Amino acid sequence: MKNIVITGGSGFIGSNLVRYMVNKYKNYNIINVDCLTYAGNLLNLVDMEDKTNYFFENIDIADFQSLKHVFEKYQIDGIIHLAAESHVDRSIQNPVKFVQTNVIGTFNLLELVREHHDNGFNCRFHHVSTDEVYGSLGNEGYFTETTRYSPNSPYSASKASSDHFVRAYVKTYGLNAVITNCSNNYGPYQFPEKLIPLTISNIISGKNISIYGDGLNIRDWLYVIDHCEAIDTVFHKSDKGETYNIGGHNEWTNIDIVNFICETMDDKLNLFPDRSSKNLIQFVNDRAGHDRRYAIDASKIQNELGWIPKWTFEDGIETTIDWYLSNNDWIKNITSSEYLQYNEKITKINWRS
Ligand SMILES: NC(=O)c1ccc[n+]([C@@H]2O[C@H](COP(=O)([O-])OP(=O)(O)OC[C@H]3O[C@@H](n4cnc5c(N)ncnc54)[C@H](O)[C@@H]3O)[C@@H](O)[C@H]2O)c1
């Protein structure tokens, strides 16, 4: 058995990735290292609890000594690092958490991998990052792996900083590390504060849907399972020191996405024109430093490693809406205090230690 750590495994992308890896690789022990912030939800992984190759460690990656304990407990063969503070609005309100987790947390992991490396162990370190490190595009062009970093929010600045540390540890210490920079993800288990799940959950509960500025900001959207497959591909096939952009070839303005979700949900919920969920849309003042357009050139990962996205946006959105409609309790739980109590209860159980 190989021991693979996934940090942030209780979050949106992390829980999808844990499920994907636990089911696909029976010869891997998957160790989820997560300190369960508001975005980390053990309800996301209830179906993993009885799997013999799944382990959970309730650890804050900003706490070096606790993290070291994981390296002492398991002989670690690889790390896929997703743990992060990930919401731009929260980074504008309280940037310090972003430095602690995204910068110091990544630094702590790199230091422990360096120690491991110096002791003669090979440990692949896969750093999961974002296209937001590149800043904002105009109407033309795409981000490539050589685009200059130009982060505009405290979130993207913290991710850019962590990317630079990873790069430096490859160059300076020879660490076996790789970086992926991905566009916006959507899919099941995403906390309803980001555009797509927030729009869906507000339609379900009849609340207003707020759109920043003129709604014409453009993002490239990728279904989360496509991202998991891309991570799997890079983690296993990439040469050390490489970086890959991951994207869905799928640009949408925010207002078009919201309208598309409204139309799909109006159909599903039989909302007739006068009761259309589009009536919930309201425009609000723009976010400070709001990037206008992100678009990814993902030809490197396609040409070198053979990865392409499989999900169409239409299928992905429909599956996502269906998931939220049939998991209304999940939305209620994670937005209430109940799930905090569940997290607290479950973390008192020291799983298979
Ligand atoms: N969501 C996207 O669209 C997107 C796109 C590209 C890249 N990414 C990157 O992918 C990663 C995962 O994103 P997500 O959307 O799943 O995030 P998320 O906010 O849903 O989940 C983050 C997870 O990290 C955990 N965490 C936070 N701080 C921690 C700490 N100090 N110690 C241990 N665990 C901690 C949280 O409890 C949570 O489980 C992030 O690194 C993010 O930058 C996300």
Image: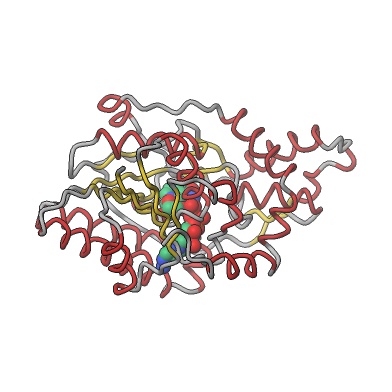
Q: Nearer the viewer, residue 34 or 317?
A: 34
Color encoding of the figure: secondary structure
Q: Is residue 86 visible?
A: no
**Residue 29 seen in the current view:** yes
Assign the C terminus to one quadrant of the image. Answer: bottom left
Ligand 1 location (quadrant): bottom left
x, y percent for residue 112: 22, 63
Give left or right: position of 312 versus 34.
Answer: right
Residue at 35%, 63% in the rendered image: 158
Question: In the figure, 295 relative to 166: above or below?
Answer: above
Q: Residue at x 45, y 49 (%)?
A: 54
> Which one is nearer the viewer's eye here, 81 or 345?
345
| Residue 119 placement (x, y as % from top left) | 11, 59
Q: Is residue 321 above or below residue 92?
A: above
Residue 204, position as x, y percentages in the image:
78, 49
Q: Is residue 311 left or right of residue 207?
A: left
Q: How many marks?
A: 0
What is the x, y in percent for residue 55?
A: 44, 54
